[in-house]
Image (cartoon, helix red, strand yellow):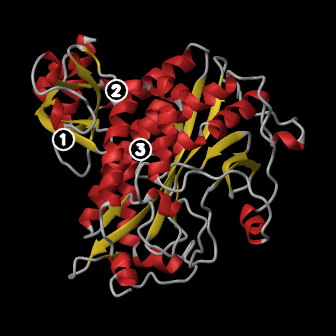
Amino acid sequence: MGDSLHDQMAALRRQGIHSVLTQFTDIHGVAKGKLVPLAHLPDLVATGAGFAGPSIWGTGLLRMGARSEYYGRVQPHSLQALPFMPGVAHAVCDGFAGGEPLDTCSRQVLKRQVARLAERGLTLWVGIEPEFFLLKQGADGRWQVGDALDTLAKPSYDLKAMHRNQVLLEDFRATLTQLGFALEQIDHEDATGQYEINYRHDDALAAADRYQLFKLAAHAVAERHGLVFSCMPKPLAGAPGSGLHFHLSLTDAQGRAVMADPVAPASAMGLSADGLRFANGLLMHADALAAICAPTVNSYKRLAASHSASGTTWSPVWKAVGHNNRTCLVRSVAGRLEWRLPDPSCNIYAALAATLAAGLDGMDHPALPMPQACDEDLYQRLAAGQPMPARLPRDLHAALDALEADAPLRHAVGDAFCQQFLALKREEWSSYAQHVSAWELARYADGS
């Protein structure tokens, strides 16, 4: 490894690289790190870049002693030049403390789930669909859509907006291509100021790493154009919010698809028994998963069966699975599962780890009844006043209660991580609950 690492350093120097951006992810899913001279790369790989543990959200580390220091160990395979930071190479880090993997590091949490899957000879493949808003702050400090002319009532696939923003979108394309993203499409989404960029799927850990790099690049590109790349799930009250859908599939050691069964009856929705059981696990643990996959107060403004200005809403409110049915929480398509709960405010490592843990639990309970296919538009069913499937928690507080009550999922994901997550998110909810909003003042201030 030593020779290969030195060869890697030599190759980076030939590219003009002088520093390494050692990047880790805090419990909120935010990328953090520091710049370290390239000459220190062997130490960064062996020991890691040092950070004060209590200065990082969710580590649970003390202010003194051997386990007060957080070490981000560079993963050499992840090193690559950053086009928006000349002379700097990006590196993904794993969290360590006291010489041991840190159980509150979300990347370590996902690695443990991937290892559980590997023991079964299986690999999880994940396609991530990032939706996001491009916003700016006005002179009055209020947030608004970055493109003032982006005002269509139904803006999906708006080519005029894409033409106006061609320079920005080309910057996205060029930057992501330089970083090795296999782009598949860029389109204007269903809200004003909202876009989606799709790129090729990967194994679960690589997909999570790549999404974190995507966000890092997207923030840099948007800032170059005077805009903010926003992962806020629902910044516009009357418009659809942003999801972060996971397309999930499993393969065995021979590369054969495990979830798909093309000759299954229609009621199986193109899924094998394992695919149906994985979906069952997602539905069984959906309430607890909401806390990790939709982890902010604002997430539940997206997860509401509310009217949309565009006339369409895709909010996955009800715990159901259907074949190519976007009104369900789980959608089967082409022999894989689309998990529609996550939003871009999530910690991608934790969300994927919890999703995988839930799916495995479903596979480990073959005696449970298989989920029934939903072949109705659930929003039409709601409008008709018909009985509905059970729905997701209505707010973050209820989702946190569900996670706390779901001991099997917490144990599978990791009690130490979940303890830190629940404590921080309870504080977030408490802060929100004590805030007096403009809506409350307008509604109640002059009332009797």
Q: Earlier in the sequence, mark 3 or mark 2?
A: 2
Kindly identify the amino acid type of the residue bearing the numbered disc 1.
Val
Q: Mark 2 or mark 1, which has the lower sequence index?
A: 2
Nearest the camera: 431 or 171? Answer: 431
Please rate how many residues cluster around mark 3, counting C-alpha atoms within 10 Å: few if below 14, some from 14 to 19, many from 20: some
Residue at 61% from the left image edge and 38% from the top image edge: 248
- Kindly identify the residue that appears in the image at 40 percent across and 49 percent down: 177
Pointer 1 local density, CA inside 10 Å: few below 14, some 14–19, many at least 20: many
Which image quarter holds the N terminus?
Answer: top left
Q: Amino acid at mark 3?
A: Tyr
Residue 28, picture quadrant? top left
In percent of width and height, residue 246 lies at 56, 44
Q: Secondary structure at mark 2?
A: helix
x, y percent for residue 182? 48, 46
Question: Which residue, given by chain and number where applicable, does mark 2 sit on?
Answer: 77
Please state which of the two labelled residues, at mark 3 or mark 1, is closer to the viewer. Answer: 3
Residue tagged 1? 88
Front of the two marks 3 and 2? 3
> Real-space Cα distance between discs 2 and 1?
15 Å
Whether residue 16 is visible to the viewer of this picture, yes or no, is no
Q: Which residue is mark 3?
A: 211
Q: Which of the 4 image quarters holds residue 417?
A: top left
Between 305 and 234, the one nearer to me in the picture: 305
